[in-house]
Image (cartoon, grey):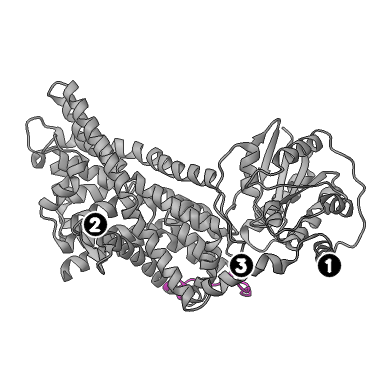
Amino acid sequence: MQRILMVGKPNSGKSLLFNQLTGLRQKVANYPGVTVEVKRGRCEEFEVVDLPGTYSLSGLTRDEEIAVAEIKRAVESEDTALVLCLLDATRLERSLVVGLQVQKLAREHNKSVLFALNFIDEVRRFGEDIDTWALSEELGSPVVALSARTLDGLHEFKQTMLEMARAPQLHRVSHSDSSAESTVRRSRELASKFGIQLDVVLKNQNSVDRFLLNSWSGSLVFLAVMFVLFQSIFTLAAPLMDGVEALIGDTAVGFAALLPEGVVADFFNDAIFGGVGSFLVFVPQIMVLTLIIGLLEDSGYLARAALMCHRPLSFVGLSGRSFIPYLSGHACAIPAIMAARTIESPHKRLITMMTIPLMSCSARLPVYALLIAVLVPANATFLGMFNLQGAAFFGLYLFGIVMALIVSQVLNRLLPRDLEQSDMPFILELPTYRMPHWKPLMHRVANSGWMFIKRAAPIIFVVSVGIWVLGYFPLNSSLENSWLGAVGHYIEPVFAPLGLDWRYGVAILMSFLAREVFVGALGTLFGMDDAEDNVAGLAEKVQADGLTLGAGLGLVLFYVVALQCVATVAMIRGETGSSKLAWGLYVAYGVMAYAIAVLVNVLI
């Protein structure tokens, strides 16, 4: 299959244009380093390849090296029909640096080049325009203006792209000066002649940045944004959670009425609705978290937040580029570890990857929500205006961040710097403030909920069924005298210092497969004694069971620190190439979490 390559600088809108051309839903955001892998899709009879953004063909970061290596390899291939180079119409000079380099490389291998002048809607919003015909004459390759966000000019661009890919043209190789200095000079000349004045773009942006990047006002805004982020996980998701909870409860009652009393009815009530159903109620919280992070990404605020965090992060051996993987880690550790590739320093990249598991990912949300509901009254407020449960949520996330910074400082002093080169300055492009593109954002939100269900449901189903079988047999025996009770009592001494009985020990043990299993396992364990109850009463049942404040707080902090995700371990192993390091981290965080839980239970 013939291919169309998409290249360009970071934040030029490649991923969004890729989605529009292929109908796929790759992640789209407004900060450098989102696309850290090669993405592939289909447009008509061609394969479209979205490469990581790069500012030049002399790659500095890991994702730039991936892009440069793929560009050089792909243009040599006979399967490549067209090289599509994206230009940011609002920052033409920076875009043309890599554009001119790619054009020369493509022509050396007799490949056609098409320039896509993206964000033309923003240029026209400033009352300006760009003469694409004259710019095409100067470049010697077609230039088509479009907006991947508003779809302005997209149809004409797609037609031009397909025509060029179907009928590639032969090109004369240029022997002009191709040094870095001449490329930058040529880019500046073309931008001065055809591009809009940069001060027009930056005028409004700078006035906002003076406030958001100020040491005092910017810090207050950053803390407020982070607090609202975690407060919203509880407050905005609460009505949706209540709806899901009611739906599951009504379904369980209706289904129970269709079945005769016996093993089958008990299985569906306890194992399915009490175990698997108990984690579905937390899906809205994951979707709300994804929505708010997506808004911050698409608006351009994340790049400012990374800049604000650079100085404090540098004190613990990290840089501002670590902020984006850290924040991404609150959704899922796996893409966050991949995003750490954008960090130039091998030493800082390794520390970032090793501490990302301390960020509270979405799999922890069900555990947090359940235990906070048990420990914190639902109607309690903080400072008379904030929901106390939401404030507790913020505290747990903050605890994970603080732990990550402490561990980073320790690792910064202990890890060898054999691979460390001269430390490069922290340079980050501040993108234009933009309104989110709602269609892909909402698709991402819905997909986050679906992927959580898809990933967690099979594991929770297997664990719930296993626990139900062990707890149900021998027949006519109490839960404590069942096979499960025997296993629980055997491991109970391990969890006794945490102030927890054998049921919590079984649920914790099962959750080492994946954290979210804890809620389903506990729902199954508590539901067996009363099959008529479902997930709606799980928090009340745990609370009525007499869980102490010290044991509950220690338990929830255990889940903040423990690395209970085999997929994350596998990703760390793949990125570092060391099984010893990955599994050592798994054990180390487990021991640390256990020690913290014991200490909290003893002191409170």
Quarter of the picture holding the C terminus: bottom left
Q: Which residue is mark 2?
A: 372
For residue 127, above or below residue 108: below
Instruction: Kindly report the secondary structure that dominates the magenta region of the rendered protein.
Output: loop
Asked which secondary structure carries label 2, the reply is: helix
Query: Which quadrant of the structure image shows residue 33?
Result: bottom right
Q: Which amino acid, by three-letter code, is at mark 2?
A: Ile
Residue drawn at 42 percent across, 56 percent down: 330
Query: Could you say which quadrant of the image residue 226 lies in?
Result: bottom left
Q: Residues within 10 Å of mark 3 (few under 14, many from 20)?
A: some
Disc 1 vs disc 3: Cβ atoms closer than 8 Å?
A: no
Q: Nearer the viewer, mark 3 or mark 2?
A: 3
* Residue 362 visible at all: yes
At 90% from the left and 41% from the top, the residue drawn is 170
Region of the chain picked out in magenta, as a range: 410-430
Q: Residue at x 82, y 63 (%)?
A: 183
Q: Is residue 537 left or right of residue 425?
A: left
Residue corresponding to mark 1: 185
- Identify residue type, mark 3: Gln
Check disc 1 and give the amino acid type. Arg
Q: Is residue 416 visible?
A: no
Rate crowding at label 1 as few (under 14), some (14 to 19) or many (20 or more) other CA atoms within 10 Å.
Answer: some
User: Looking at the image, which is closer to me, 111 or 539?
Assistant: 539
